[in-house]
Image: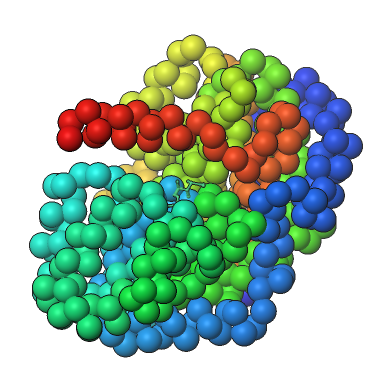
Amino acid sequence: MGGTITVNYAMGEEILRRADGYAAEADRHCGTLRARDLPYTGWVEYASRLTDGELAEIKALAEVIRRKCTVFAVIGIGGSYLGAKAAADFIDGGRGSKREKDAPRLVFAGFNLSGSYHERLIEEIRDEEICICHISKSGGTAEPSIAFLALKRLLTEKYGEAEAGRRIYAVTDAENGVLRAEVREKGYKSLVIPADVGGRYSVLTPVGLLPMAVAGIDIGQVIEGAKASSAPALMRAAKRLACVRRSIQEEGKTVEVIGAFEPFAAAFTDWILQLYGESEGKDGKGMLPVGVGLSRDLHSLGQFFQEGNQVFCETLIDIANPPGDIVVGADGGFYAGKRMSSLNAAVRAGMIEAHRSVGVPIVTVGVTDASAHCFGMSVCFFEMVCAVTGLLMGVNPFDQPGVEAYKKEMMRVLRRES
Ligand code: PA5
């Protein structure tokens, strides 16, 4: 097992030259992060500090869950949901091929307040053997708390209170929050989110590792990939990308279009959108990260990209060896005999040429494959890119004061109505 990440830049020399000017500062920030001299940097090289015993504890709990259920409902939002969803979809292309056929199916809840979504989910899983896991660092976030109540009710109706309690799991803070208090009161099995790791940087802690292990993903390989991300070449690549992103902002670009050419990487793109958006979008700064699915969106937004307002740059995620392929049949005319993956590569090359010709700065992040190893490596790579970019911009990449505003307003609306 191995794999690596390579980054290619298709953009004007001036952007790259200006990026060189940030190199020394990026080195300093990277050093500060690796020394964990800032609050909420517990995610930095977390994989290297994770002990065999801690990994074994997660695997053992996953094994118990796997024996009990056919459906594992993961309840969480933002950083407590997107990483597990990204991993489940991305690793091995989300297919059972390399995983055991009888692994429980992961379903996700609590990332919206849609009654329709949750009613339908409950109907869909009602006759399955179910376990649920509430993942929340604060333990009090509205969306997952409401979904937790609904799914707990389903379990209690189906199994009775005692057995329901044995099918409920939690991943939360060690000490604080209403979820931890409920765990203590009801005796649910639980794992801990490290206090010094913020939500969107938590995918390689029990937040993401438990759902991955339940789904049959080799979390040992995920962790090995994460450790490999601190190799000097990858650290250099991450710092360089941070410098280039900083320089692109100085060019006046206010939007970063991010996308992959594989649908199995769509949730991984969503995870990056949160990581970049919530870490960098503050103090009136940052580029708005916008997700696209490729080549699909070349047939809609492609017009804008080619001829519209040039406020954006592009970051493309390219998985070099996707886990499946098809050869076009003999009746395919010009395309006959070609692998679909080579057509996908051609569309990517065509997009880069066409957009570059009108001055769009384009970054391509190439990942060897969709293995567990490459997933772990990619997560750490983008986390480092994001944190260093934020520090180069002069913002705190680890807080999110802005997300409180809508919550306050929502509570005002609810109080007015009651
Ligand atoms: O990155 C973050 O901190 C947020 O996206 C949180 O993960 C999200 O708001 C969920 O919070 P919690 O885990 O406390 O329920």
Q: Farthest residue to the right: give it.
A: 24
Residue at x 56%, y 84% (from the top left corner): 56
Percent across and percent down for residue 33 are 77, 50
Residue, x 58% and y 74% (percent of image)? 221
Left or right: 71, with 59 as reference point: left
Rendered position, 184 above or below 193: below
Answer left or right for 147 relative to 137. left
Coloring scheme of the render?
rainbow
Q: Is residue 339 in view? A: no
Would you say residue 39 is visible in this rendering? yes
Residue 103 sits above or below residue 300 on the image: below
Residue beneath the point at 15% across and 68% down: 154
Which quadrant of the rendered structure holds the N terminus? Answer: bottom right
Vertical arrangement, residue 281 with respect to residue 93, above or below:
above
In the rendered image of this protein, does residue 278 appear above or below residue 308? below
From the image, which quarter does the C terminus lie in? Answer: top left
User: Could you say which is closer to the camera, residue 185 or residue 346?
Assistant: 185
Q: Position of residue 265 (x, y in %)?
A: 44, 52
Residue 178, horizontal then vertical, whole percent: 40, 59
Q: Nearer the viewer, residue 96 or 348?
A: 96
Q: Does residue 137 appear to the left or right of 30 in the view shown?
A: left
In the image, residue 185 lies at what x, y percent?
36, 74
